[in-house]
Image (cartoon, rainbow, N blue to C red):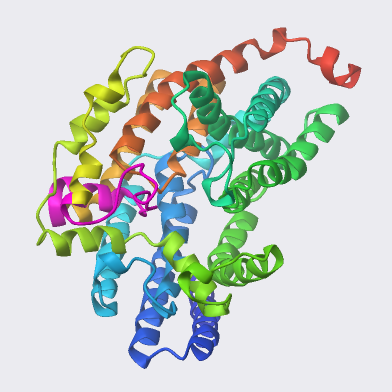
Amino acid sequence: MKDWTFFGLSLIAHSTLALVVSAEANVSDDRLGYCLGHFLLAAILNALLLRIIRRRSLSLLGSPALAFVLISQLYFTMSAIKYLEPFPLYSMFDLDYRERFVGTLVGFGSLLTAHVLLAAAPQPKLENLRDFFDRNSLSIARTLAVTLILDLLIKAYLFSIGFGSGYADAGLTVRETRNPIELFAIFADAYIGPFVFILAGGLLLQRHLRIGKGYTLLAAAVVVLLPVLLITLFKARILILIFAVLILFCLQLRSARAAQGALQGLFIAGPMVAVFGVFIATIAMGRDFREFGVQPSLSFNAGLVGWRTDLTDFGFALMKKSDGAALDPLIVPQALLNSVPAALWVGKDEALEDRYTASLNRLGWPAGLGENEVVDYNDNAMSSMAMSFGAGGMFLGFPLYALWLSILTWMVQSGLRGGLGSVLLVFLGIIGMRTEIDWSAMFLYARDFVLFSVLFAGLYLNARRFPVEFFFGRRFAPN
């Protein structure tokens, strides 16, 4: 659909959702106005971003800066519903709704500035990724088969030790282990699963299907069953969003127009699917929210969606509390040191001070790993820059992180040619989809990119030597 049609349908769909939720919650007119204003800003950003993708023929796969901005805008769009919550879920932030909308305006300006980078800086082109899948179909298919075996072994190990999402009362979460083997398995699973999914989706949706029936069936099974396996075993519901976006990225290989339309549909329907989906899931699962003093309702679940996807309240509350000043610039070098693997630095946890927790504690906010201190703040590029560099850093959060991802992309494109470079760009694109980040995560992702690039490069370059047909049958024998 055309840009103006998409813009108009976005406003109609999102306004209808806001009116339905506000009627149940009986919110004031000013809160409804802030919600509609936020949806208006989101519709502007989304229309402009899709226009940049189309005009520059940018690839959704293998473009980490684009993936980061796109996921951030999807979060930004869905978080508009936060103004209709029955009560503030983060009462310690001490922000009224007018101040929260000012934070929304700052976020709008930051994302708009990131658009300038996407419109001007070199980014991977769609034709390059299409050529990669067309010319290297068999190598990609064999890499898929080998990597899938590794992925299933890792998932079996994680399931055996009780790993899962903290929201599902799992026996083990990433916060509760310092075992290097368990940590490696957790981080590897976070990358290998999406990587396998992209290879399978790309093979199925490439313009010219050049793999045999065995590989085709395997790729189809991965696309259908892998998300179900992850959500069932590990209760990670956010993966629904991630895999939905990834399959849309792969769809671009078949048809840029179809992918554009699907992304438009995602931006339009995303908030409604999230609110009603969470509401239905809450009732079906019988979740108990008596600790909040409420019964499951459409407005309360809308508030949960808004809280989970919000990108601006945390950073703006930090700036209000500190009068716009940086809390602790030394968080940055500490986070850099934290990226040194524990296997290479014995006693790292004891040597490094947790400056992030100390900064929040000075504000009187709970933070840490104690039973009553764990609070899931919505860390992102804006809040991290605000914490270390003040109000100006908050505004530059999104464009500077997109610039960092663009630099990594340029390094890969300049240093590696052909299929191997494309494989690593696909992996880097997975990292770019992470929008909930703090300084530690930023440096850890850079470290993981180096470490796991060696793994994925080795799998891709040596997949033809692996006896795939021994595991999967002779339909998978090389041509």
Q: State the image coordinates of residue 8 (x, y, percent, origin top left).
A: 50, 79
Viewport quadrant of the N terminus? bottom right
Inspect the magenta stretch and tell me whether residue 369 lies in it. yes
Frontmost residue, 189 versus 106: 189
Q: Residue at x 30, y 25 (%)?
A: 349
Q: Nearer the viewer, residue 9 or 458?
A: 458
The spot of residue 220 in percent (x, y) is 79, 39
Residue 79: % across, % down: 43, 67
Taking 391 as reference, is 422 left or right? Answer: right
Residue ID at (45%, 54%):
70
Q: Is residue 65 above or below residue 32?
A: above
Tell me which corner region of the image, top left, top right, bottom left or bottom right, holds residue 311.
bottom left
In this view of the protein, can residue 345 be seen by the observer? yes
Q: Residue at x 37, y 53 (%)?
A: 375
Q: In the current view of this chain or complex, which residue is farthest to the right?
A: 474
Q: Which residues are magenta?
A: 362-391
Query: In the picture shown, does residue 13 fall above or below 462?
Result: below
Q: Is residue 85 magenta?
A: no
Residue 260: percent from left, percent from top: 57, 58
- Indicate left or right for 208 with 60 as reference: right
Say which residue appears at 35% left-offset and 54% top-offset.
Answer: 377
- Residue 393 lies left or right of residue 143; in this view the side is left
Depicted 79 relative to depicted 149: above or below: below
Q: Could one spot residue 206 in this view of the protein?
A: no
Magenta stretch, main secondary structure, is: loop
Residue 23 or residue 206, whichever sits in front? 23
